[in-house]
Image (tube, grey):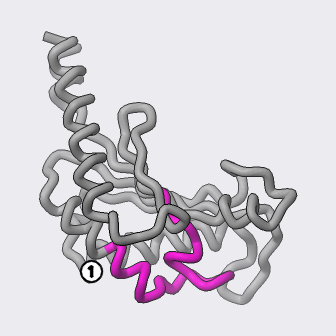
């Protein structure tokens, strides 16, 4: 029974990945990517799709991508959505953001607000977090590497209540 439940969860996440990837086909590969990692669906959105440098205000094209993603999220029950903001390691210090960590949290919060207030994603299923510069996916030594690290990851996780109940 446990193996069947695990297989069902894996299949559900793979189907969700396909649904999300299909919904976001209109956007370029250098703007976003969709993949499965550790049993979760990741939608990694590059800064250039969502924000101007040093800003947490979502650009119109970014809102377009979020609207498309929201349709999929709203049609998928029993998920949790974690919005993670990431930055490069070049220090920022503005009146709004004293450091990169604050910028990453501000961006994640902006996306949560857009998804919940403008596109109706249930706020009970969504979390905002900022990782700052501490989880790079590329080397910060080059402009391309830094650009790759300035991203927002939307991590869609299955509800594991059935699995927990079975383990009890």
Residue pointed to by mark 1 = 117
Q: From this viewpoint, is residue 168 visible?
A: no
Tally of numbered discs? 1
Looking at the image, which is closer to me, 144 or 3? 144
Which of these two is toward me, 109 or 20? 20
Left or right relative to 123: residue 8: left
Q: Picture coordinates of residue 35 (x, y %)? A: 42, 45
| Most foreground residue, 3 or 163 | 3
Residue 148, percent from left and from top: 66, 60
Asked if the stretch drawn in magenta spans residue 87, the answer is: no
Task: Reply yes or no: does residue 54 show up in magenta.
Answer: yes
Position of 41 relative to 108 (above/below): above
The residue that appears at 32% across and 59% down in the rendered structure is: 126
Q: Residue at x 29, y 49 (%)?
A: 80
The answer to whether residue 148 is visible is yes
- Quarter assignment of residue 119: bottom left
Residue plotted at (53% across, 73% down): 107
Range covered by the magenta-colored residues: 44-66
Q: In which quarter of the image is the N terminus?
A: top left
View extreme (right): residue: 141
Q: Is mark 1 on a helix, strand or loop?
A: helix
Please state the horizontal and vertical placement of residue 64, each as a whole percent of the image.
34, 80
Depicted 33 relative to depicted 161: above or below: below
- 167 or 50, nearer to the observer: 50
Residue occupying image coordinates x 80% and y 57%: 140
Quadrant of the rendering where the C terminus is positioned: top left
Q: Residues within 10 Å of mark 1 (few under 14, many from 20)?
A: few
Looking at the image, residue 87 lies above or below residue 63: above
Q: Position of residue 121 (x, y in %)?
A: 22, 67
In the shown orientation, is residue 64 left or right of residue 164? right
């Amino acid at each position: 029974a446990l193996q069947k439940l695990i297989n069902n969860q894996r299949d559900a996440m793979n189907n969700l990945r396909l649904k999300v990837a299909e919904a976001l086909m209109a956007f370029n590969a250098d703007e976003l990517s969709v993949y499965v990692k550790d049993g979760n669906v990741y939608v990694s959105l590059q800064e250039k799709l969502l924000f101007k440098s040093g800003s947490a205000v979502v650009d119109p094209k970014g809102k377009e991508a979020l609207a498309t993603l929201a349709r999929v999220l709203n049609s998928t029950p029993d998920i949790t959505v974690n919005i993670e903001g990431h930055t490069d390691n070049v220090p920022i210090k503005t009146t709004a953001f004293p450091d990169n960590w604050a910028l990453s949290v501000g961006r994640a919060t902006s996306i949560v607000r857009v998804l919940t207030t403008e596109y109706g994603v249930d706020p009970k299923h969504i979390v905002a977090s900022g990782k700052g510069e501490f989880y790079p996916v590329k080397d910060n030594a080059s402009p391309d590497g830094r650009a790759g690290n300035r991203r927002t990851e939307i991590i869609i996780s299955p509800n594991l209540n059935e699995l927990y109940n079975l383990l009890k």
